[in-house]
Image: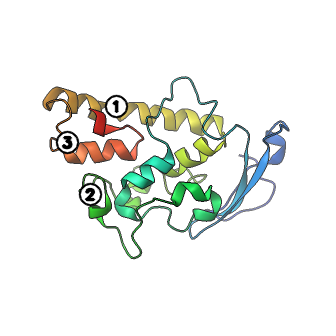
Amino acid sequence: MNLKKEVTPHQVVIPEKQFKPIELHRKIQINDKMQKGYYFLTKPTGKNFDPEFKPELTPQEMLALGIFGGKYMTDCKKEFPASWFKKAKFSSTKKNPKLNYFKVDASLPLKEWQKKGWINPADPRGWFQWYCRYYYGRRLPEEDKRQIKRWKAIKRHKMAILKNCHPFDLSCRPKQRQALLHWAYDSRKI
């Protein structure tokens, strides 16, 4: 990535010339504990997704249902529309699995994600941060392709629930159901 200026490992600056000027073209400032910089919105919010990417939940719905123990992006509220956070279940101190929809812990620590090479510096918090920014209207073609491929691979958990559980038995495989919620699959409907 050719950057306009030198940045720290947690700061991302997407070059302005990389985007065609369009009516929606808007600069979004990033200023949180893990990242400083900016990016541009080039698509309307919630529209013009890759045809292979069909999430069942919006970021706003996911936050309201309860994901990541309520301790995810609590310092990123200024980056996204305030409406996304009105009903969000956040923990004021540390991760609390009881805030998750299925009341179980279904996520690895960020250090594990980093160790496995799942993190791109553009989105240092991982897939959900990428999804929020993609939904909001940011596009990074290569990273989008990688993350959509990862999203599609998670569908194996949906197949496991379909194979092993009675329809709509939400007590069956709660950890897999919670993990699916983290990936914008609505596991309440399986």
Dot 1: within a 10 Å radius of its alpha carbon, few (fewer than 14), some, or many (20 or more) residues? Answer: few
Q: Residues within 10 Å of mark 2 (few under 14, many from 20)?
A: many
Q: Earlier in the sequence, mark 2 or mark 1?
A: 2
Q: CA distance from mark 3 to mark 1?
A: 17 Å
Identify residue for label 3.
170
Q: Is residue 166 left or right of residue 99?
A: left
**Camera-nearest label, 3 or 1:** 3
Q: Could you tell me which residue is drawn at 69 percent across and 38 percent down? A: 44
Q: Name the residue nearer the viewer: 171 or 180.
A: 171
Residue drawn at point x = 39 percent, y = 70 percent: 91
Q: Which mark is residue 10?
A: none
Q: Write the residue at 56% across / 23% down.
A: 51
Residue 105, numbered circle: 2
Check disc 1 and give the amino acid type.
Lys
Left/right placement of residue 139 relative to residue 21 reads left
Q: Is residue 118 visible?
A: no
Tag shown at residue 155: 1
**SS class of the residue under badge 2?**
loop
**Up-down: is 68 above or below 2?**
below
Residue 138: image x %, image y %?
A: 67, 43
Residue 143 shows in the view: yes
The amino acid sitting under disc 3 is Leu
